Image (cartoon, rainbow, N blue to C red):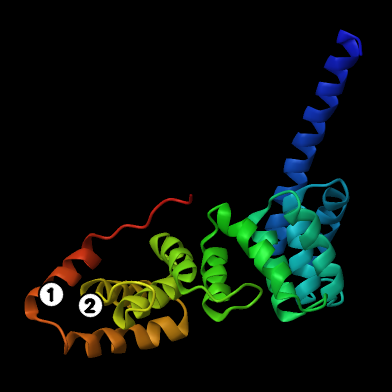
Amino acid sequence: MTKFKSLLFIAVLAGFAVLAHAGFKDGKAAYDRGDYTKAYKEFKPLADQGLAGAQYILGLMCQGGQGVPQDYAEAVKWFRKAAEQRDDEAQFELAWAYADGNGVEQDYAEALKWFSRAAEQGFPPAQRELGGLYANGQGVPQDHAEAFKWYRKAAEHGDDQAQFELAWAYADGNSVEQDFIQAYMWFALAAAHGDDTYAEDYAGDFKDSLAEKMTPVQIAEAQRLAREWKPKNKD
């Protein structure tokens, strides 16, 4: 390829990138305000051209019947395209499709594969769900130590459901040495930060019940740890 052709090729790619960015921005704005017809019009050509973000949102639209007929198989098709480009949210949705059998035959081994890929990129919800698969032995031999590892990663990133599971592991001494201070701390964090009904409603109750088995010094230390805790950045 001549220098001129190389420069022309680079210019064309740059032009496409600018147009793609503008189209994606317009599509996302339309999607956020509920104008799914406009969103689909913007996202579909970008998805066809291989833009992972557009493919992911098309998957969501097909999954939820937003501007298009609900079609789980079509959603899986778009999630897969984006997931294969390492889009962690698409990998997460594809994993759930396999776990639930929506649009594809239920397959926990495939769910494990895609949750793992998203988890390894540092996506907290995938880390939490991967912990759940190991805890329940779905798609993999049951392994509470591995479950604990992934729950901890998600909990440290601020996932309230993972914080609840981590607290429970410490309280019960399951796969880790029993530690009421750590259990109290994580229950307190799950209760304070939870936007999930189960974690928000029950973590506080479990924390209060646990306090009955602890000394005032232990409770004070657990409360200090909870106050000083800060979420880690994405891996």
SS assignment at label 2: helix
Among numbered discs 1 and 2, the one appearing first in the sequence: 2
Q: Which image quadrant is residue 171 in?
A: bottom left
- Crowding at mark 2 (Cα within 10 Å: few <14, some 14-19, many 20+): many
From the image, tell me which residue sits under label 1: 218
Q: Nearer the viewer, residue 190 or 134?
A: 134
The image shows residue 68 at horizontal and vertical percentages of 85, 72
Asked if the residue under mark 2 is in contact with the one under mark 1, i.e. CB atoms within 8 Å, the reply is yes
The image shows residue 228 at horizontal and vertical percentages of 22, 60
Residue drawn where x is 70% and y is 56% of the image? 28
Q: Which image quadrant is residue 22 in?
A: top right
Q: Report the quarter where the N terminus lies.
A: top right
SS assignment at label 1: helix
- Crowding at mark 1 (Cα within 10 Å: few <14, some 14-19, many 20+): some
186 in relation to 26, above or below: below
Specify whether 75 is left or right of 156: right
Residue found farthest to the front: 141
Q: Which image quadrant is residue 12 in?
A: top right
Q: Please name the amino acid that badge 2 sits on.
A: Phe
Residue drawn where x is 88% and y is 10% of the image? 4
Q: Please name the amino acid that badge 1 sits on.
A: Gln
From the image, tell me which residue sits under label 2: 180
Q: Nearer the viewer, residue 54 or 77?
A: 77
Residue drawn where x is 12% and y is 72% of the image? 220
* Total count of labels: 2
The image shows residue 212 at horizontal and vertical percentages of 16, 90
153 in relation to 84, above or below: below
Residue found farthest to the top: 3
